[in-house]
Amino acid sequence: IMPVIKKRIFASHIKTLDIKQRISMTFIIAHWRFCFFFAEKNKENSVNQSEDELVDFEGNAIIIKCNYTATDPFPYLYWYVQYVNEAPQYLLRRDRNSEDNAPRFKDRFSATLDNEKKTVPLLINNAQIFDSAVYYCALRP
């Protein structure tokens, strides 16, 4: 009998991986939740991250979606990352005229602001196990 590792995926679902699968398929778990934003909380200025959790393989490119609604036609969108037992850290900013990444996130993290589709997906290239964290999308109208 092969030992079994259970990994919690959603509050109501359990995914089971046997030891062989777990060792041979190193993977990353990137979490993200509902976002916060810098403006007043209303329906006119908001962000939405539709999925609660993402599981993928180490080395893959990962896209974390973020849709937004804003009264300003050219808002500022931000991404933050929060590692276990740490405060959220600034990752990057995108707006109509410019973009900025925190120095430690310049190499593998990027985002493209699409004002027509009202999206700013976060792309993590060559994902690593240490990228496992909570990712927040934020809006400043």
Image (cartoon, rainbow, N blue to C red):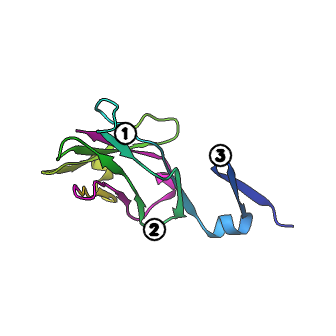
Give the residue at x 22% y 41%: 71
What whole-number distance in Å separates the C-alpha atoms at marks 1 and 3? 26 Å
The image quadrant where one finds the C terminus is top left
Q: Give the structural element (helix, strand or loop) at label 2.
A: loop
93 lies left or right of 89: left
Q: Residue at x 29, y 39 (%)?
A: 44
Q: Amino acid at mark 1?
A: Gln
Q: Which residue is mark 2?
A: 60
**Residue at image mark 3:** 11
Q: Amino acid at mark 2?
A: Asn
Q: CA distance from mark 3 to mark 2?
A: 26 Å
Instruction: Tell me the CA gap for discs 1 and 2.
Output: 23 Å
- The answer to the question of whether label 3 and label 2 lie on touching residues, with beta carbons closer than 8 A, is no
Sooner in the amino-acid sequence: mark 1 or mark 3: 3
- In the picture shown, does residue 126 fall above or below 38? below
Classed neighbour count for the residue bearing mark 1: other residues with Cα under 10 Å, few (<14), some (14–19), many (≥20): some
Q: Which mark is residue 89?
A: 1
Tell me if residue 41 comes above or below residue 22 in the rendering. Answer: above
| Residue 59 point in image, percent of width and height | 46, 67
Q: Residue at image x 48%, y 42%?
A: 83
x then y, percent, for residue 63:
40, 61
The span shown in magenta is: 115-141
